[in-house]
Image (cartoon, helix red, strand yellow):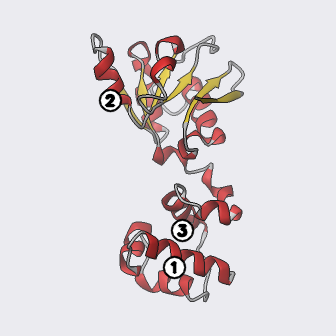
Amino acid sequence: MAKGFSEKLIQFRAKNSLSQEELAAKLEVSFATVNRWENGHSEPQKAARKKIDLLFSSSDFSQSYPHLNSVLSHSKRSKLTIILDENLFQLKPSLKDSGFKVLALKKGMSDEEIRELAEGTAILTNNTKDFLPHAVADDYDVISIEALKFIDTDPTRKNKTAQKIAKAIRDSGIAFIRGNFNLIIKNDGAYELKALV
């Protein structure tokens, strides 16, 4: 691997006060493997690159090494918690089966309870107007599915609605982009990502 990668890995580890052993544990590799990467003697394999990209996605590391970004879209699901609007609870099993952490709003929750729960997550809703006004102040993203003409109730990974949602989340990069966004999923599976300010 290029010397630049080794240097950047060392810098990132030092900046985050991680020993080689701690970084190895986070990446689920051996200490010797991290040592070989840092010394430029070997390159991370595909699975390790995914973990590196996930771990470093909040830093400038992945921007400095765009070759790692190609694996990012396949691993977005592990960084995003989705909160389902109370009328979409039927999507919970299929989205969980797709690898997302999923919570469902309970009927009767106050706006304050919802906003507190939503901080740092994404709310999946077909009632966007209720959630957009507070998204930036309360630090959450909004995933809008008003355009979907049919909500599949199949509780498995074969759920067509969940497949459209999962693909849009992964392809948009919403889980790793700083700031708050409205991800609008269209009936054909296309999406539009709008920054909220």
Label 3 vs label 2: CA separation? Answer: 32 Å
Whether residue 100 is situated above or below residue 16 in the rendered picture: above
Label 3 vs label 1: CA separation? Answer: 16 Å
Label 2 vs label 1: CA separation? Answer: 36 Å
Q: Circle 1 sits on which residue?
A: 10
> Residue 149: where, in percent of width, then height?
63, 11
**Label 3 secondary element:** helix
Within 10 Å of the Cα at label 3, are there few (<14), some (14-19), or many (20+) other Cα atoms? some
Amino acid at dot 2 = Leu
Image quadrant containing the N terminus: bottom right
**Label 1 secondary element:** helix
Whether residue 123 is situated above or below residue 78 in the rendered picture: above
Within 10 Å of the Cα at label 2, are there few (<14), some (14-19), or many (20+) other Cα atoms? some
**Label 2 secondary element:** helix
Q: Circle 2 sits on which residue?
A: 117
Image quadrant containing the C terminus: top right
Q: Residue 86 carries which label?
A: none
Instruction: Inspect this view and state whether residue 126 appears.
Output: no
Amino acid at dot 3 = Ala
Label 3 or label 1, whichever lies nearer to me, is 1
